[in-house]
Amino acid sequence: MFIFLFTLTIGFLFIIFIVYKQFKNQAQQNRKLFFEKLSNYKSDSRPLIIGFFHPYCNAGGGGERVLWTSIKSIQTKYQNVICVVYTGDIDVTKDEILEKVMSRFSIKLDPDNLFFIFLNKRKWVEDVRYPRFTLLGQSLGSTILGFEALKKLTPDFYFDTMGYAFTYPLAKKIFGCKIGAYVHYPTISSDMLSKVQEMRPGFNNDQLIARSRILSAGKLLYYRVFAYLYSLAGSFSDIVMVNSTWTKGHIDQLWGVNSKIVYPPCDTASLTKLPLEDRQRIIVSVAQFRPEKDHQLQLQSLSCLLSNYPNFQQGPEKIELILIGGSRNEDDKDRIQKLKELCKKLNIEDNVTFEVNASFEKLVYWLSKAKIGLHTMWNEHFGIVVVEYMAAGLIPVAHNSGGPKMDIVIPYNDNITGYLASTSEEFATKIANVFSLSEEKYKNMQINARENVIGKFSESVFQELILNLLDPILQENSN
Ligand SMILES: *[C@@H]1O[C@H](CO)[C@@H](O)[C@H](O)[C@H]1NC(C)=O
Ligand SMILES: *[C@@H]1O[C@H](CO)[C@@H](O)[C@H](O)[C@H]1NC(C)=O
Ligand SMILES: *[C@@H]1O[C@H](CO)[C@@H](O)[C@H](O)[C@H]1NC(C)=O
Ligand SMILES: *[C@@H]1O[C@H](CO)[C@@H](O)[C@H](O)[C@H]1NC(C)=O
């Protein structure tokens, strides 16, 4: 019996070894072929391949801006580095992708040392495939996709920009790559665990499970095991970047690393050209009409301001709150209706304007006229709208939590750049503060706010930071 098991194990290991060798040979072959095709390549030193694992590279969202800006940065500094993007967008061509990058982000990439490896196995990471155990299913699925990528062309440096941590052990141990990660969002977070633990329903926890003790315990165990595997996978990384303080907190704790914050580049260039002068007592709120944005709090704050600060009633000009946001469906429409009713009830309807589905021109118009940018969402992970307010020359009055508190509304050279508040009374007080500032003080704060966001969130800062972090790896092969 023992001998039988022993032989079986050895046989099994032998088969794995053969398969592994086979794949490794194929991967090496593919790499050689790739270099041969590069024969017209200008540099005499051996080029270094940096592979970006980004299966949805044609999506055109914030994560893609990070991807293309990183590639642009590398192309401008290193002539002998070849960028490769692994993507599952098999219905488009390289030219089409590059065109979209240009039209969507105004980023012009050099096509000569940028290559695309098209992957056919993306269906393995789609969530519809795993109605149950979605996290685990997608994560294991990502190793299949990662395998396809690494076999088709093994890079020297494997850079995951979409958060597929389960591919790192594979890339590092089997294919011998160095590993970089840019993490937008942890795959599992302590927030998700506590939601299950406290048996609260939510997007990751449905009613049925929230109601049952046994199911909740089972799910908690599953999450714990998953979190453990996620930490294990993440610890294979060599360089870890995160997109915010919130993400850093979770990733450092889970992976046991000291990640670097590299804020995604925000496109604020046009807003920073708006004049700082000629601002009226207008408060702007830019937010989708969704419940978590908490428009009620904005209306209550205005009501509080108008009733608690009677001297504003006789101010030099009218106080106005402009609510700018899109209405995409019936629910949004109902919410807008309810907000209008609340305005009547609070007796502030003359001082509130709804700009539903405003055009970009209209948005910029209000941003150039108003003094204050209002933000009331609790615990928003970032809050790009607050960055936009500050770039546009408004003083933010934002919720005292999440990204606005940790990353955005923070002093610049020891000078404050805006205000934070939680309750309607606090919001009213902070708004009153801004309106009471002398012209000179107001202008100084505007300058500080604008400089702060340019200095932290602009494209050039992103480029500098990411190149600094990649330098040790890219330098290695550059001579
Ligand atoms: C980080 O990524 C998450 C997920 O895409 C996003 O919600 C958040 O706003 C991002 N943070 C920054 C600073 O852009
Ligand atoms: C509110 O709007 C009304 C009507 O336009 C205006 O008369 C009043 O002065 C406004 N209140 C403040 C405090 O500006
Ligand atoms: C806003 O746009 C959506 C579609 O994008 C439309 O359904 C809705 O009716 C519009 N609402 C208003 C008030 O214009
Ligand atoms: C910022 O604060 C410093 C002192 O901390 C002061 O000297 C400087 O004038 C301030 N700058 C602005 C623009 O307010």
Image: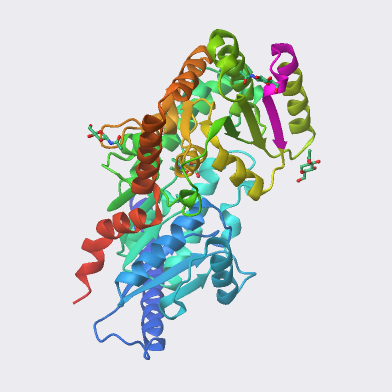
Camera-side residue of 303 and 94: 303
Q: Quadrant of the C terminus?
A: bottom left
Q: Residue placed at 52% from the left, 16% from the top? A: 428
> Which region shows up in magenta?
343-355
Camera-side residue of 408 and 133: 408
Q: Quadrant of residue 30?
A: bottom left
Camera-side residue of 153 and 357: 357
* 357 shown above or below 66: above
Q: Position of residue 2 (x, y in %)?
A: 34, 48
Q: Position of residue 183 (x, y in %)?
A: 41, 47
- 470 lies left or right of 58: left
Considering every residue shown, the one lying at the far bottom of the view is 40
| 17 in magenta | no
Q: In terms of image quarters, where does ligand 3 lie?
A: top right
| 353 in magenta | yes
Q: Residue placed at 42% from the left, 50% from the top? A: 264
